[in-house]
Image: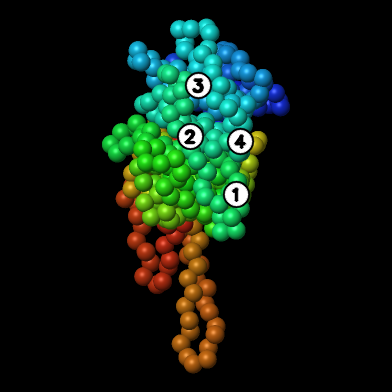
Amino acid sequence: VVNSVLARWGVQTRETQIQSLCLSSISSGSVVAALRNNIVKEVEFKKGKAGHFHTSEKDIMEGSQSAIVSLCKSPVDDGGERLVSCSQDGWIECFRSDSNIPNKFEVGGPVERMRGCSGTSTVAIGGKENDLSLWDLSTQQCTFRARNVPHDKLDMRVPIWVTDMAFPKLQGGTKQDNNMVWTCTGYGQIRVYDVRTQRRPVRSKKLNNFGHLKTILSVDDTNLVVGDVQGHLARFDVATMRINGHFKGFTGGIRSLDIHPSKPLLASCGLDRIVRVHHLSTRKVVGEVYVKQKLTDVKFCPAFDLPDPGNHSLEEHIGKKRKHIKVTSRTRKAGRGSNNDDDEIVDLDVDNSSDSEDDAEEESDGTISNDDDEDTSDSGNI
């Protein structure tokens, strides 16, 4: 696994800009992409000789007049799956591989994001001055419509701007709970909705030092990850309504997040043109790659294996070599009023031939170990 682009597909033009990605239900090695010209394509990546990848594409459907903002998968009653797209003006289209005619109905716009609840036929939509609503794709009926929060202390109406939403994951599985919905807004708020109790949010929190929140993603039943357009990414605890950690290294707005289905890895991308992979527990960057263009969406591809990071860094699994690490230790000279420091530079040449040699003993004369600050530059395939 190396920090490089394995395969490229398409031509970089304004009309073929990718608006949204979704893993295909037809093949685990393919993705579905919604383009700016409202054409939905399935792109399949095949690994050839010498590790090279080959791509093939085919058109699935053509959307409505306005831009497609989101794609997702949803199960059907007979055990299959359908591809669901939502346009900016509020039209949802459901497409099945055994039918050439998509099922289309209106949910009302403007829509900024649509999210599907895994394991159910429920989707959530929201946008600017279009509060959260849940729809059942089987009946094409609205099952929940949120109500705005009360007026503020100046008796002024609170504006609505839903930018993203997420369903909490159930414990011990990949399915999600469609009775609880978490949303983020363009005004820096995180809101928690309980469909079974009331239409207004049961909890709401304004994040300090955060601006326009752009994306939100559930980690488990009580934790989520939220990012904004200023490059802030944090882990948020819904139980306490507090931030319990920040992810570092961003220099531009964050546009998309994704969690690996089986490993504690978080992928992110945005306007700084870099795809980063963080460890969810340590929140350290375990890999990044520069892809030369502004990014709108990122997905983990389960068709390609990743080394299991476990409780250690990915360096132990990849075998990254460390050479000539210079460490400086400063010792104070004895004597009152003496401010002179001695700089001792130690050149460590670490051989990576065996795992036992990676754990070199620290020097007894004050040499500082630099293992915690090492760069692990290898990430998973995205």
**Labels 1 and 4 touching (C-beta < 8 A):** no
Q: Is residue 157 left or right of residue 262?
A: right
The residue located at (47%, 71%) in the rendering is 329
Label 2, label 4: how many angstroms apart (C-alpha)? Answer: 32 Å
Answer few, some or many: residues within 10 Å of disc 3's Cα (few below 14, many 20 plus, some between 14 and 19): many
Of labels 3 and 1, the one closer to you: 1
Nearer-the-camera pick, 319 or 288: 288
User: Between disc 2 and disc 4, whose residue precedes?
Assistant: 2
Q: Secondary structure at mark 2?
A: strand
Rendered location of residue 213, percent (x, y): 56, 46
Residue lying furthest bottom: 336
User: Between disc 3 and disc 1, whose residue precedes?
Assistant: 3
Of labels 2 and 3, the one closer to you: 2
Numbered badge on residue 6: none
Label 3, label 1: how many angstroms apart (C-alpha)? Answer: 34 Å
Residue beneath disc 3 = 84
Q: Is residue 62 left or right of residue 223?
A: right
Q: Is residue 233 visible?
A: no
Residue beneath disc 2 = 145
The residue located at (40%, 72%) in the rendering is 365
Residue beneath disc 1 = 157
User: Between disc 2 and disc 1, whose residue precedes?
Assistant: 2
